[in-house]
Amino acid sequence: MDVSNARAKEPSEHPYDNSKSPGTDGNGYFATSASLDTATDTTPSEHQSWSTVPSPKVSAGIPSAHRDEPGFMSEERDNLRLMHHFAVSAHKSIAPSPGAVAVWRDLIPQLAFEYDFLLHGVLAVSALHLALTSQVNKLAHSALALRHYTAALALFRPHLDSITSSNIYPLFAFSCVVPVYIFGYPHVSQFPTNPLPEMLEMISVMRGCADIVGSGVQWLMNSPFKHLLLQPTDPSQALPKEIEDALTGLQERNNQTTTQLALRDAYATAIETLWECFQVAGNMPGEQAPALPFPVKLSAEVLMMMREGDPMALIILAHYGVILHWLDTVPWMKGWGSTTISAVNETVGEDWRQYIAWAVRESKKPTVRA
């Protein structure tokens, strides 16, 4: 998701400013999706077009005798069920902090009825949540998630050419939906045996979210969406000794082995961001907010070195994997932390492994939801 060229323009209205209430009129409509009322036994491929994915199996809950009554088509029933599930359950697993729950439960669904790309995004993560958490119609919900997400992306991209104080809110909301989907969908398609390429692609996408925030931070900070933004931490806040020792070891290794000054500074900044992530984790145990600072703030240079397999870059990534492992009970995040740490441990040479020993030990501990 390349949003680096997005431009910010400010019209006179600020529809989601704290001083005004958002309108509910607009062009949102329950667009056509895969129906739970038709049949298939095929698991959708991540690369299939939303128009060619086979329709999924009949859903439970709606007696067949009533499916043909006038008023609602099967696709509309599917969408209503998905919106209901989002409102009562799925939104809770997305909100990165307690303060963000109301934004996801109330404001974002309301806004989705004005912007079709956001409506498709909401329905996609709701269907994906059902596929991840329920054994009923798992393939059907997987197909619905893929169709809605693919449709959402097509509708979303044109808006990036002109970010304004009117569309910044749905654009930002959708940019928060995208990581949820890309972290979660491999669990219902095929989880990668080597997670590093996918993990780095996810980080790249989340960096794109930062571009959208940068285009409209002044508007977001004066709206309820401020609860979805990164909150500052106290740099003087101490961490548990084992975490401090691990991060200090990273800095020492960076100073010893990275000869290029600009790259050494970039690595040092990434390690400082890890420090921030662990501080947030200490303040908000069990919440998803600690997973946000690292990918959002990671420099393009460090991301490139991770892709090239530079050991220093990879051991930094492994420590971010600890943050993800602590979120292993969140449906979208399951497995990403431990598999990332394991992949790094297998990739780097023996002389680097002592610097991720703590991360490896941590990845073997069970995760308990706070």
Image (spheres, helix red, strand yellow):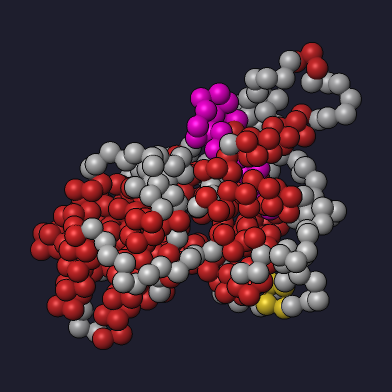
Residue furthest right in the image = 70
Q: Position of residue 217 (x, y in %)?
A: 60, 73
**Residue 357 can be seen, yes or no:** yes
Nearer the observer, 321 or 144: 321
Residue furthest left in the image = 351
Examine the structure image and report whether residue 126 is included in the region drawn in magenta: yes
Q: Position of residue 313 (x, y in %)?
A: 28, 68
**Residue 336 can be seen, yes or no:** no
Which quadrant does the N terminus fall into?
A: bottom right
What residue is at 64 percent from the left and 60 percent from the top? Answer: 224
What residue is at 55 percent from the left and 53 percent from the top? Answer: 99
Q: Position of residue 126 (x, y in %)?
A: 61, 40
- State which region is magenta: 118-140
Identify the main secondary structure in magenta. helix
Q: Is residue 5 above or below residue 346?
A: below
Position of residue 266 in the picture relative to residue 288 (left or right): left
Q: Position of residue 361 (x, y in %)?
A: 19, 48
Q: Is residue 84 above or below residue 202?
A: above
Examine the structure image and report whether residue 260 is included in the region drawn in magenta: no
Nearer the observer, 234 or 215: 234
What residue is at 34 percent from the left and 55 percent from the top? Answer: 282
Nearer the observer, 294 or 106: 106
Position of residue 157 in the picture relative to residue 260 (left or right): right
What residue is at 83 percent from the left and 30 percent from the top? Answer: 72
